[in-house]
Amino acid sequence: MTSKLPGGVPTAYQDTFASDNLPPADALPEFDFSGVPDIASYPDHLNVAAELLDNAITQGFGDNPVLHLGDSTWTYRELLDRANRIAEVLTEDCGLVTGNRVLLRAPNTPMLVAAWFGVVKAGGICVATMPLLRARELQYVIEKSQVSIAFCDTGLAEEMAGALELTDSIKHTLYFSKTGSGGEAATLETACDGKSGQFSTVKTAADDIALISFTSGTTGQPKGAMHFHRDIIASADTCGRYVTKLVPDDIVTGTPPLAFTFGLGGITIFPIRFGASTRFLENPFPDHILETIQNYKITQIYTAPTAYRAMAEMAKDYDISSLRQGVSAGETLPKATWKAFHEATGIRLIDGLGSTEMFHIFISATPEDMRAGFTGKAVPGYRARVVDDNGNEVPPGTPGQLAVQGPTGCKYLDDLDRQPNYVKDGWNYPGDVYEMDEDSYFKYVARADDMIISSGYNISGPEVESVLLEHEAVAECAVIASPDPDRGNIVKAVIVLRAGFDGTDELVKTLQDFVKNEIAPYKYPRAITFIDELPKTQTGKLQRYRLRDLETS
């Protein structure tokens, strides 16, 4: 079964701003629910908070742990109580009307999760933001999504105050502590103290909007991607059920912020869907991650390739025998990193391709089916193909644009200019160049804008990066096109060296020869620059466009 709009049930929202700013029907992808029986049988009315939290109590998980931070642990019943109280505050004290947008600003904490569920229980729409955003960046998000209520961690109050000076959209602002312990500044907890903890979750349509997630800015101004209640549950019932295969005994951790859909899904939605628990990290550095795995018997982790590369070198100093899975996303997982982590730990990392627009991972494979150097296959519930510029499927082994359909899809908030770039003829185009082999495994080639054309040759920047990362001197690298009068462009590598290596002319030649010996010589980097740190987004994605801008400025 496919459709342009899932469900078709009228919205339950009084404030229809979000649904009014959905792309028109002919600009939406087709939504396909036929691949997974669970999704095909979703009811027309569904609220993600009731589906996850209230159902967890019904399933007998009420007294089980759900969230940990430091010495604090919440049970499912305690999380439900706090979410209900926050929903009461929203409706009784803040005057929330169903469909209103609520800004959430915090690092990964139990109270952020409670606030998230409180908003959707009350029929609001969550607009979570990265903790490091500055006031004017917050202003853009607030005004683009017309937010009227804000919940903010007390530790992030300064930039929140700056944003409030720049916009008059926010009518109510409440602050909270990390674990609900309160304090003079924690006005949300104070408001919750007077509430009952009993709240009847709003009966939203399955295709009412629950979340507006802003992209992380790898290509400039962020875009607001809207997600239905149905989308969020569908991601858990595809990737969470069939790839990561969570069970109640799992303890999950990870580095991505919950404002990033990779983090929201992997370390909050997926564990709660299957009765597991999450331990939030108090800092994201690799040594602390390993220490957390060792001390708290973590079984699954979500983070970026750079963290796995660093942890592979440190793993021998820690007991991480409890860890059964590592999930990588945000950037493609280089073959060298996959092998290094496997050799150090015995764990076959799960690579995954997802996007903010699709909510979560749609190309991946279970550990036993994962092949180093490949992203995986279409996750059950999704279908994917590689196509040429006219949308025609290309033969195995031929690079082309990746196109995807499934139960989730791109729905930009009020962005008719960029919606057609992502959705074409009912298919989602994440902007990746892939090859598919005879076994339907997808191999990453490049982002569409990471292909380098030099003297008529098409060269994949990430392919060259993967080779360079195999050299002992290279800690991190980015490969970009550098304008050249004779060749159009040349391949340029920007490299962060490991300790003990110096960026000499001799090392440049060594690295160039290394690449020539591993892949076709025309792909080698004709220019190499050494740098202390590569530009990245707050979610760890490499910002190649910033390096490219330097080449053309």
Image (cartoon, grey):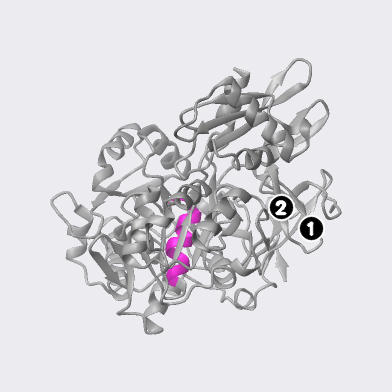
Left or right of 185 on screen, residue 96: right
Viewer can see residue 334: no
Residues in magenta?
Answer: 259-272
Task: Tell me: residue 122, above or below residue 473.
Answer: below
Left or right of 424 on screen, residue 501: left
Task: Tell me: residue 345, above or below residue 150.
Answer: below
Which residue position is annotated with label 2?
A: 443
Q: Secondary structure at mark 1?
A: loop
Q: Secondary structure at mark 2?
A: strand
Q: Give the amino acid type for the residue marked by disc 2 in the picture.
A: Lys
Name the main secondary structure of what is drawn in magenta. Answer: helix
Residue at the top extreme of this rendering: 485
Image quadrant in which the N terminus is located: bottom right
Evaluate if marks 1 and 2 touch, with contact meaning CB atoms under 8 Å apart. yes
Q: Residue 442's spot in the image, x, y percent? A: 72, 56
Q: Is residue 122 magenta?
A: no
Q: Residue 133's spot in the image, x, y percent? A: 39, 38
**In front: 32, or 120?**
32
Viewer can see residue 125: yes
Residue at 43% from the left image edge and 39% from the top image edge: 143
Left or right of 196 on screen, residue 542: right
Q: Residue 119's spot in the image, x, y percent? A: 37, 60
Q: Is residue 269 magenta?
A: yes
Which residue position is annotated with label 1?
A: 437
